[in-house]
């Protein structure tokens, strides 16, 4: 590594027999191509018109000879570096010439050898072997590709059906292959104690580590490595495809970024989510906003930070704060919990159609009575819940800066039935475990502190703030509701064994097309708050509850 590979001296050789066909050396380059049965000696397969008559367009299925002739012409010219001739062997010469020119000029792929495989109908697979070289550093490259031969519009001549994937299977329209310094230097991410964070140790941290490199790679003191990568065009970016590294020539020198993650809690979070499919969890410190753990059982997407899911009844924490502030509910006062309540043309009901006769608001919260909240919808303005989420809990303003990409929740202004559904975490409300852990942290701390993974002192970024806090009376009642639910309500089973100052709320969110709802759970214990979701698994107390409770038992 770091030295240019010595290229063997080229020499002319005689033909060799391969699989019953004749392989010939073309131009002394050493590329075996198939001699063709019935192929045209002109190489382009053009017909010669009889005197006084125009050539007729070819039609009908392609013959084996036509397919192999067209493939041979294209692959041979590409290997020789005869870009114009290779492009002419396709049905879109202009696009082909541009990408094939960049193959050598931008991707810096040299000494290309193309080996065709067995034809299957009009499709011909092939293997590419070459050397990628950049500023004295070289590395071999091998991959497989395929081309398809079609009849060109107009004259019916067999040509390679041009598409970027012919050059490399990862390419789409507008994409390019480029070799050079990596977009950002690598980073060495550390936990709060100085230990290195790796995917070998913490399997679900891949997206987080990628986000740290993207954010801090250029400022963390490292130097970029050299790589061959796919640089995405507009269409690929619109489809949210990122640039992709195909070959790393040199690693570069990593910079260092310290995070707030606790090695003990991160290990526990990884262990917990590994026991369930589609599980995500976040733990943080209410007194500071420091994120102590983040884990997902699905490693490709960071649902814990970037998910946008209906939070179900965990949203009732925010709704309760709104109702108490407006004098529409009080923890120990009587509150209706009927079997059904109709609003905006929708008939809402409780799980198993239960009702609580003569119960208090605390009883309705602890048992997660939907109609206790829906029944208050006629007394609320359409934007009340949105303002409460933004002004008190810091949600839905798109201004969090945690250190890596995150979704800050969404509580849109809605009306009629959709507004009522939002009160119980359905409708248009969208959250993730990070958001809901922050909700519990805000209740515990009495003030919103924006969660963060990297200290703002590292890059002088400004953390989001909420415009107001809850009154002492409202906050006290909200804590009473969550504490009662943790001990006697739907969260009691999961929270059994979690001692100290605790509070919790369960949730289940119905999703179209799912037989089971997404299970949610948010809770706090002392100076530790956590929230989790298990998708398509059932009630939150049974699914996400044990995951969150296990982290709370670990402590901060």
Image (tube, grey):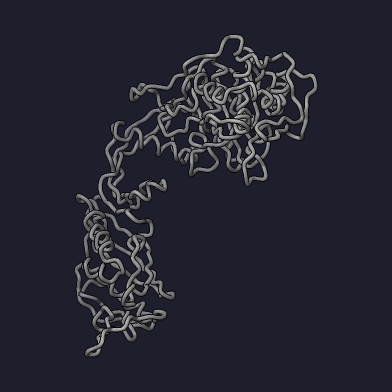
Q: Is residue 136 left or right of residue 540?
A: left
Name above or below for residue 68 compared with residue 384.
below
Tell me residue 539's x, y (percent): 68, 35
Q: Is residue 501 left or right of residue 211?
A: right
Count every numbered label the image shows and give the total: 0
- The residue located at (37%, 50%) in the rendering is 235
Name above or below for residue 376 compared with residue 251.
above
Tell me residue 53's x, y (percent): 25, 87
- The residue located at (46%, 16%) in the rendering is 467
Q: Between 271 and 90, which is closer to the camera in this rendering?
A: 90
Q: In the displayed orientation, state which residue is furthest to the top.
A: 472
Q: Between 494 and 97, which is closer to the camera in this rendering?
A: 97
Q: Between 545 and 473, which is closer to the camera in this rendering?
A: 473
Q: In the displayed orientation, state which residue is furthest to the right.
A: 357
Tell me residue 520's x, y (percent): 62, 33
- The residue located at (32%, 54%) in the rendering is 174
Q: Work out whether residue 501 can be spotted.
A: no
Question: Image quadrant of residue 429?
Answer: top right
Q: Is residue 193 left or right of residue 379?
A: left
Tell me residue 148's x, y (percent): 38, 70
Q: Between 61 and 414, which is closer to the camera in this rendering?
A: 414
Q: Is residue 299 left or right of residue 118?
A: right
Name above or below for residue 67 compared with residue 95.
below
Name above or below for residue 103 compared with residue 21.
above
Q: Work out whether residue 327 can be spotted.
A: yes
């Amino acid at each position: 590594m770091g030295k240019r590979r010595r290229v063997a001296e080229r020499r002319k050789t005689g033909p060799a027999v391969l699989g019953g066909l004749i392989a010939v050396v073309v131009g002394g380059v050493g590329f075996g191509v198939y001699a063709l049965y019935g192929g045209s000696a002109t190489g382009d397969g053009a017909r010669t018109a009889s005197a006084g008559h125009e050539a007729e367009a070819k039609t009908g299925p392609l013959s084996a000879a036509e397919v192999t002739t067209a493939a041979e012409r294209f692959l041979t010219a590409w290997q020789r570096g005869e870009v114009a001739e290779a492009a002419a062997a396709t049905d879109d010469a202009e696009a082909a010439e541009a990408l094939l020119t960049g193959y050598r000029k931008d991707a810096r792929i040299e000494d290309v050898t193309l080996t065709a495989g067995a034809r299957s109908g009009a499709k011909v697979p092939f293997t590419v072997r070459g050397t990628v070289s950049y500023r004295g550093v070289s590395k071999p490259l091998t991959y497989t590709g395929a081309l398809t031969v079609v009849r060109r519009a107009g004259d019916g001549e067999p040509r390679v059906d041009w598409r970027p994937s012919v050059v490399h299977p990862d390419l789409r329209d507008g994409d390019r292959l480029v070799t050079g310094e990596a977009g950002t230097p690598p980073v060495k991410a550390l936990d709060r104690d100085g230990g290195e964070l790796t995917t070998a140790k913490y399997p679900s941290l891949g997206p987080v580590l990628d986000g740290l490199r993207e954010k801090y790679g250029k400022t963390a003191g490292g130097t970029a490595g050299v790589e061959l990568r796919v640089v995405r065009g507009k269409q690929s970016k619109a489809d949210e495809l990122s640039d992709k590294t195909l070959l790393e020539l040199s690693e570069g020198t990593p910079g260092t970024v310290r995070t707030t993650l606790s090695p003990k809690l991160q290990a526990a979070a990884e262990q917990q989510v590994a026991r369930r499919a589609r599980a995500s969890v976040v733990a943080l410190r209410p007194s500071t906003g420091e994120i102590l753990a983040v884990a997902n059982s699905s490693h490709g997407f960071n649902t814990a930070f970037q998910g946008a899911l209906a939070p179900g009844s965990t949203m009732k924490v925010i709704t309760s704060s709104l109702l108490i502030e407006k004098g529409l509910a009080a923890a120990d006062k009587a509150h209706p919990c009927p079997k059904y309540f109709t609003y905006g043309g929708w008939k809402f009901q409780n799980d198993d159609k239960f009702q609580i006769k003569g119960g208090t608001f605390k009883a309705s919260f602890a048992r997660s009575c939907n109609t206790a909240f829906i029944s208050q919808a006629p007394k609320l303005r359409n934007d009340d819940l949105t303002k409460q989420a933004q002004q008190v809990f810091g949600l839905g303003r798109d201004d969090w800066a945690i250190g890596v990409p995150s979704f800050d929740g969404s509580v849109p202004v809605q009306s009629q039935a959709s507004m009522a559904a939002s009160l119980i975490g359905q409708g248009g409300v969208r959250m993730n475990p990070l958001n809901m852990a922050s909700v519990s942290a805000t209740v515990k701390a009495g003030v919103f502190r924006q969660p963060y993974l990297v200290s703002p002192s590292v890059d002088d970024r400004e953390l989001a703030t909420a415009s107001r806090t809850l009154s002492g009376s409202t906050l006290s009642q909200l804590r009473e509701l969550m504490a009662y639910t943790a001990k006697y309500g739907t969260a009691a089973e999961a929270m059994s064994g979690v001692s100290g100052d605790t509070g919790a709320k369960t949730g289940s969110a119905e999703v179209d097309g799912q037989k089971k709802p997404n299970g949610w759970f948010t809770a706090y214990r002392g100076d530790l708050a956590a929230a989790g979701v298990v998708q398509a698994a059932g009630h939150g107390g049974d699914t996400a509850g044990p995951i969150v409770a296990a982290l709370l038992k670990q402590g901060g």
